[in-house]
Image (cartoon, grey):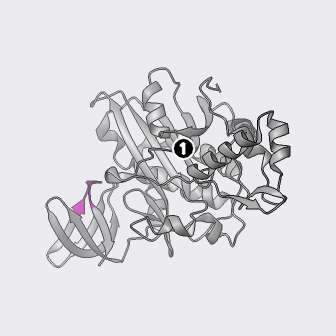
Amino acid sequence: MTSSPARSDPPPLLGLLSAQVPVSGAELAARLRISRAAVWKQIETLRAAGVVVEACAGRGYRLARALEPLDAAAIRQALPTAVREHPGALETHWKLDSTSSELARRAARLPDRSFVFADMQTAGRGRRGRTWLSPPAGNVYFSCLKRFEQGYAALSGLSLAVGVAVLHALGDTGVGGVQLKWPNDLVTEQGKLAGILIELGGEFLGPCQAIIGVGINMHVPADARGAIEQPVADLETLCGGDPPKRNVLAAGLITRLCTALDDFARKGFATFANDYAQNDALFGRALRVEDPRGAFEGTGAGIDERGALRVRTSVGERIVDSADVSIRPA
């Protein structure tokens, strides 16, 4: 397992702030060996990035809520011994434009099964060109580089297999009540909890590579929810205020994905089909499907052997195999 010299660390000021006890500006200045004015400027920079820093009259500054920056060493330590050598690289960054973009820039130089995590993304993206909102150290964002000897056609159902792996990783940390929404979301009764975005590169007939981006909501502030076009869920709410630690969850995700991606490379989607069917959020649901060919309504009827969505309509079953669609309750 290798580390990157390009790692970006959390601002030193963040490590000195506490969510419990205020720290005076004078103490922060002394420990950072900068002026009080420079401390104030750095606090304003954190606030502009989305970190809520409270000013406590006469006592200094404190964080509105505790933050747990991701740490490659802590993640590596939390991996099972048998898994520690599986990832090709493991990096954590305080800020990136997007973890998938970082992997894409360096894909030719990175080994297979490389993982890049970020505490904050300035240009995170979701399916169909949407922006993924990224509060600092509030959620879990990462991408994985996986190489395949096969071509693009053999990767049908990959996003569903990744969804199964993420679902199991959440279950390993005690998170329940999560289902899979075709083609690449994890949802709860409250709304969307996580999303998956896969970008392919290489030769169409093989070999090729997949950059697999995953975003999981840990804590979505109330003011951020208003900027999101659909209902959302987060682990903090789902777990009654006691979500899994971010570094522990990151280790669980790596563990499950390393196994799942190797299984997919050998056997394809078939080995994941039963798990997906057991957690299919759309099965038996009244749906409205909107795609470039027009909208139609029907009932979710599961997935086929390639991972395409089956929808029963009044005129027979229709197969939806393009991710460039919108699936909503009818």
Q: Is residue 42 above or below residue 34?
A: below
**Residue 153, position as x, y percentages in the image:** 29, 40
Q: Residue at x 17, y 79 (%)?
A: 314
Q: Dot 1: within a 10 Å radius of its alpha carbon, few (fewer than 14), some, or many (20 or more) residues? A: many
**Residue 292, position as x, y percentages in the image:** 17, 58
- In the rendered image, which quarter is residue 222 located in? bottom right
14, 1: nearer the viewer? 14
Q: Residue at x 13, y 60 (%)?
A: 293
246, 175: nearer the viewer? 246
**Residue 130, position as x, y percentages in the image:** 36, 53
Q: Give the residues drawn in magenta, as a range.
A: 319-325
Residue that carries the numbered disc 1 in the rendered image? 142
**Residue 266, position as x, y percentages in the image:** 45, 38
Q: Main secondary structure of the magenta part?
A: loop
Q: Is residue 20 visible?
A: yes
Kind of residue indicated by mark 1: Phe
* Residue 52 horizontal side relative to residue 134, left or right: right
Q: Quadrant of the N terminus?
A: top right
Q: Is residue 266 visible?
A: no
User: How many discs appear?
Assistant: 1
Q: Residue at x 56, y 54 (%)?
A: 135
Give the SS element for disc 1.
strand
- In the rendered image, which quarter is residue 199 located in? top left
In magenta stretch: residue 46: no
Q: Is residue 4 above or below residue 172?
A: above
Q: Quadrant of the C terminus?
A: bottom left
Q: Residue at x 83, y 51 (%)?
A: 24
* Residue 153 horizontal side relative to residue 108, left or right: left
